[in-house]
Image (cartoon, helix red, strand yellow):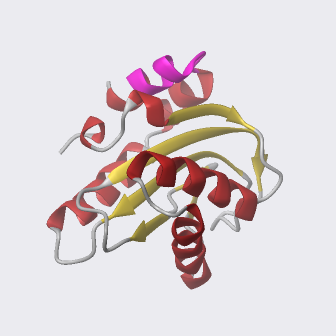
Amino acid sequence: MKISDFLAPADVVIDLRVPTKQQLLQDLARKAASSLGLQADYVASELLKREQLGSTGMGNGVAIPHARLPMVKRPYGLVARLKPPVDFDAIDGKPVDLVFMLLLPPPPEADQLTALALVARTLKTAGMLERMRRAKSASDFFAVMTG
């Protein structure tokens, strides 16, 4: 599995301005819901429920909010670079500026763990994070993510 299997060029947002984690998740949910034909409030609610279990802010300015939705048949990704960063209750206490949201099918689909693990591994690479932060456009950002 590759990131391009669940991330399309249209699902990259750069320099998104949001004041809070909640607003960020609502904005991402709205965009994802529009792409997938779902209700934005439902998607946002599921993302927020997952965050209540523990922040998906993994440190180094990165968060991977995700939710399992019964109507999602295959992993769907949406990535955003924030400007300025927002507090995300990340494990290192630092604000987040790179967010990769994943909507996943319910278990027992093996792809969901593969997609989440792939994104987490990709976003742990310092060189990758630096290239993502330097990308000049959404298409450059997509090329970095899928390159």
Residue 51, given in percent of the width and then of the height, sits at: 58, 75
Can the viewer see residue 93? no
Can the viewer see residue 2? yes
145 part of magenta stretch: no
Q: Residue furthest bottom?
A: 53
Residue 91, given in percent of the width and then of the height, sits at: 63, 68
Magenta stretch, main secondary structure, is: helix
The C terminus lies in quadrant: top left
| Residue under the point 35% across and 51% down | 76
The N terminus lies in quadrant: top left
| Residue bounds of the magenta highlight | 135-143
| Residue under the point 56% across and 80% down | 49
| Residue under the point 23% across and 61% down | 73
Residue 25, given in percent of the width and then of the height, sits at: 63, 59
The answer to whether 19 appears left or right of 93 in the picture is right
Snapshot quadrant of residue 125: top left
| Residue under the point 64% across and 49% down | 61
Residue 127, given in percent of the width and then of the height, sits at: 47, 30
Give the total number of marks visible in the rendering.
0
141 part of magenta stretch: yes
Q: Residue furthest right?
A: 19
